[in-house]
Amino acid sequence: MENYTKNFGFKHKSGILMPISSLPSKYGIGSFGKSAYDFIDFLDKTGQKCWQVLPLNPTSYGDSPYQSPASAAGNPYFIDLDILVKKHLLTKEEVLALKNDSKKIDYGWLFNTRYSALRTAHSRFVENKEYKAFLKANASWVEDYALFMALKIHYNYCQWTLWADEHRDYSKAQLCKDEFETEMSFWRWVQFEFSAQWQNIVKYAHSKDIVIIGDMPIYVAHDSMDVWASPEQFLLDENFNPTVVAGCPPDGYSPDGQLWGNPIYNWALMKEQGFSWWIKRVGSAFRLYDILRIDHFRGFAGYYNIPHGDSTARNGKWDSAPGIELFEAIGNKYPKSKIIAEDLGFITDDVRELLVKTGFPGMKMLQFGVYKDDDEYMPRMFTTPNCVVYPSSHDSDCTYTWLCELPEDAKARLARECPRNTKQPRTYDVIELALGSIANLAIIPMQDYLVLSNEEGRMNTPSTASGNWGWRISSRYNTESLRNKIRALTVKTKRQK
């Protein structure tokens, strides 16, 4: 597909995966404040070209950015409080009470404390031309988001399918907007402030010749603005409940499969409408990121769906998705799109064919490459530089723990592929293996550069409902020693920007 920009406009570069939420902060969670700018300086000094962040969407129950109540919106927790002080929307005394030095993010505490501070800041905000320009540019989603959140508050955060009919039905709810105008104004401002702070970070990154990679989950949460505002785009019954839900089939790691619970798209209608829903969604993502990593790419070739109400994924079945037609429509609208396909998991020939047709770089995960001889995920087996290599990801073991727990046959294969360098930790050998590959881009999670274990740094364990997304980096990470180590590896493997 010649519509897409290949090689991202650069070749043989590297970057770091570091979630905004995990940045150092005095206030319990990473934000768009000074620590974000310091991290960009860290990337610059170590020769990195890319900063990969996880989805910036709001979180809900379970704290996962991959189960967001609004796919186009930004996480209010990322709004930096010190910046609000500088704007005279909060006082230094007011933010003192919000300090939190816990080693992990406490989302319950954030929920109970952060919104009251944001409401105080909003009460002092005076609308200006930038605010009005933001509302006009984002009218396609920000009004729906503001009304959805106002109704969420009205119903004490219960699922939208349990609201009264005049609010559960999107068309009827439009007639009630005046009643909720005060609350809606708060949520509009939240998104304006989020956007203003984030765009300043992106601008600073670009000034250092660093680009931002963002994530877009393939599915949206059922309890979301997306489904409430466009129920016809999903396979729902007359009560707006899913008829089928997303997941993964049983395998050797998960005998019951994975039951994600997201509603499935009404692909037939989406195709009939020229995939306008997807074009709008991708457009919102490209307002935030330079490069977009699309999660669960295989679901665009064929998707696994499970009857709603089942307790496991055992009774699911495979159906075909629109594949190349969808990406041609996106490419025609956004001809300079830069997309990474997360093509991991149960990969079949139709997925491989779709990857070739799109021209998107797929992902190579080194942790997958040692369980059989001559595995495709080992760097010497890469057949093209048009890929992105990772030693680990936010969903996997930290490389340190993975190395400790490898079975003997896998350790032997890794030893052949990746000789030990006694002058550096074994984790750094694996990092160097990734950086030394032909892959056009190598992304290293920050936890691996810090040689953290799962106990210290694991971000997410798939199919577990709690205990995830809480990792916070120490404020003392940014040392000259670490910067020199990372830069030395980057230069050695000829990946410096």
Image (tube, rainbow, N blue to C red):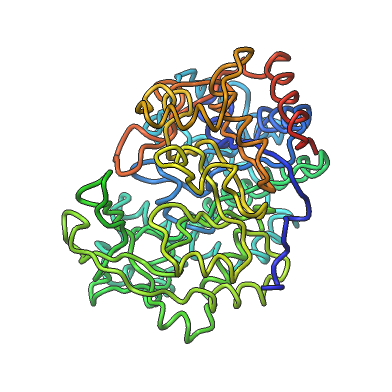
- Is 485 placed above or below 210 here? above
Picture residue at 35% right of the left edge, 28% below the top: 407
In the picture provided, is 189 more to the left or to the right than 153? right
In this view of the protein, which residue sits in the foreground, 449 or 329? 449
**Which one is in front, 475 or 461?**
461
Residue at 57% in and 70% down: 280
Look at the image and tell me in which quarter the C terminus lies. Answer: top right
Rendered position, 312 above or below 495: below
Q: Position of residue 81 (x, y in %)?
A: 60, 32
Q: Position of residue 157 (x, y in %)?
A: 32, 50
In-front residue for pair 471/431? 431
- Whether residue 110 appears in this view of the structure is no
Numbered label tally: 0
Based on the displayed image, in which of its 4 quarters is residue 240 positioned? bottom left
Q: Quadrant of residue 2?
A: bottom right
Direction from residue 154 to residue 368 in the image, left or right? right
Q: Is residue 414 left or right of residue 491?
A: left
The residue lying at 24 percent from left, 62 percent from top is: 162
Q: Quadrant of the N terminus?
A: bottom right
Q: Nearer the viewer, residue 488 or 478?
A: 488
**Taking 169 as reference, is 104 above or below it?**
above
Q: Is residue 158 visible?
A: yes
